[in-house]
Amino acid sequence: MFDTVKRDLKTTSYYTNPKFGSFVNFFSLLDDNGQIVNNNFEDWQLEILNKDLSYLKTQLNSKEISMKVQSFKNDGYMRNYQKLVDCANSMFGCALNIPLYLVDILPEPFETRGCDSVSVDKEDESKLDIPYGIYFKKPFLTHCYFEFVIAHEIIHQIISFYSNKYFPYTTLIEEGYCDLFAAIILKESKVVNTHTIKQLFLYNRMLKSEDSIWNYYKIAFKRAIVSTFNEGINNSIDKIKKGRESFINIDFKKEINLNHNEKFNFLFELLEIEMELCLDIDEYHVINKCLLNECNEKFINKFKSTLENLNAKGLLIFDQGIVQIIDHDIFSNMRYRI
């Protein structure tokens, strides 16, 4: 059934719909007919996956979503791109005019690296003979994902502008700050709402496997947030304006100073998003059974270790065979990993 559904519609649905589970890896479990092919799931796991699959199919067939995505395509990408550039210029005190290239393939050597986009600064232009600007691959041109990636690339351009010398690489901590300020300019420019920003980071960073490069982006992103909360947003802006040199041998504090600007509270929520929103599929199953008061003695014995993990996370109380849900509201936006 998925061969008739456009990729942009699927991806837009992930980021904007609060009821989805973890669809990052979901489609790798399906055959061409949309049937689950992995035989390692237990019956209760298949029940969850099939329920989400049915829900997803309903959403993808929605005329309202389809019309929204189609109308956005007309001029929305360039309009949002300019809003993000203007917001970044205002925040960092510059007036960059950054060309945007929508291409079928990225210029080498970037295409072979498996990227969806790349930021080419003025120094790159002279050394690699590639025109200055931001390049984004047309096959991945998707509302929400486009803005998420482009905002990140714009911050790279700002950092390059303020750098005193050429760096042929970027450090992971710079990637973390690019994610941090991407979230900020996405919010400040009102290109996407706060809920969608959380969804973008959840699916593009938080749910990646531990051995993925994106897991290191996630770690760097969290460090950038902690540093910003400790030092203040203005100090982090100044760090960007000192260029790429400021991200070499950077020192981090582990503790978080909560005397931060409430305007950026949503960043603090991103720090805790894994614990609150991202559960293993067995944890998701157990929580649902507890919410439905279907957690009997046999069930408790089977999922004892899971209940203990949830107790350690502070999501429920499991003590001497008795299970108690702490706060029903915390589970309103639950996600699970596959």
Image (tube, grey):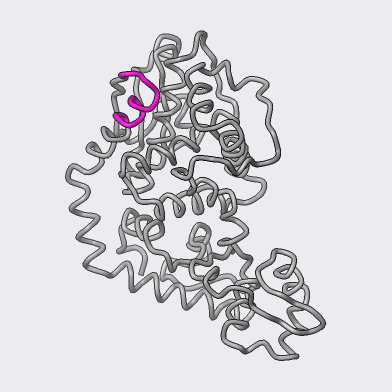
Q: Which of 280 and 181 is in front in this view?
A: 181
Residue displayed at 45% across by 10% down: 127
Q: Is residue 63 magenta?
A: no
Which is the main secondary structure of the residues drawn in magenta? helix
Q: Where is residue 289 in the image (x, y as percent from the top left)?
A: 61, 83
Query: Which quadrant does the C terminus fall into?
Result: bottom right
Query: Which quadrant does the N terminus fall into?
Result: bottom left
> Does residue 36 sit above or below 81 in this rendering?
below
> Does residue 109 sit above or below 329 in this rendering?
above
Q: Where is residue 296 in the image (x, y as percent from the top left)?
A: 70, 91
Q: Where is residue 95 in the image (x, y as percent from the top left)?
A: 30, 19
From the viewer's perspective, is 284 left or right of 251? left
How many marks on residues? 0
Q: Which of 216 and 159 is in front in this view?
A: 159
Residue 229 image-quadrant placement: top right
Residue displayed at 38% across by 36% down: 150
The magenta segment is 85-95
> Does residue 236 sit above or below 24 in this rendering?
above
Q: Is residue 89 magenta?
A: yes
Q: Residue furthest front?
A: 259
Residue 326 image-quadrant placement: bottom right
Residue displayed at 29% across by 34% down: 102
